[in-house]
Amino acid sequence: MAIYVSDLENSINWYIEKLGFTLERITEKIEGETLLDQTIRCALLNTKNQRNALVLVERRDACGKKILPSTNGYFHIAFEIEEHRTSFEFAQRLREKNVFISYGPVKHSREGDGEIGGNIAVYCLDPDNHYLEFFFGMDKYDSLCY
């Protein structure tokens, strides 16, 4: 998963301090004509169980001005919580780190919020208003059919 951010250092710190990611490395690459003379800086972030689970991308135009990201192209980004952990524990961790929980924990089911999936999820926003879901307990495919 790669997302555009407005301030690479701020986003790196937020994902490390608030969500527990670790920094693999920062790369700088000038793409030239392939990206309309934009300068790209990327931070590769790891989770406990996955290298390069998230790539944060900061773009600047040919004059060095930051290109602000848009979150209009998708609804949210979902991350599965590590095994033997729950969205309730994750929500508590977010609260302890002063992260505003925008929705949940909630069970996605007919009995819960009316959605399918069966997972229990909690949602928050990152510094660039990317809507993030953290879930556990996803139903198997057979149980999704009504």
Image: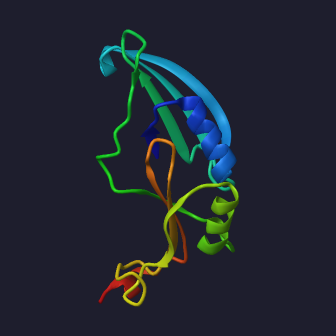
Q: Nearer the viewer, residue 26 or 11?
A: 11
Q: Describe residue 16's horizontal placement relative to residue 109 as left or right.
A: right
Task: From the viewer's perspective, tell me whether residue 61 is left or right of residue 24.
Answer: left
Q: Residue placed at 46% from the left, 46% from the top?
A: 1
Drawn side of residue 86 relative to residue 57, left or right: right
Q: Is residue 80 visible?
A: yes
Which residue is rendered at x = 55% and y = 58% of the image?
100
- The quarter of the image holding the C terminus is bottom left
Reply above or below: 61 against 25: above
Q: Residue at x 60, y 65 (%)?
A: 81
Find residue 94 and report its image quarter.
bottom right
The x and y percentages for residue 115 are: 35, 78
Residue 56's x, y, as percent? 51, 37
- In this rendered view, identify the residue nearer to me: 131 or 1: 131
In the rendered image, residue 96, in percent from the top left (x then y), is placed at: 70, 60
Q: Is residue 43 above or below residue 22?
A: above
Quarter residue 34 falls in: top left
Whether residue 82 is visible, yes or no, is: no
Question: In x, y percent, where is residue 136?
Answer: 56, 73
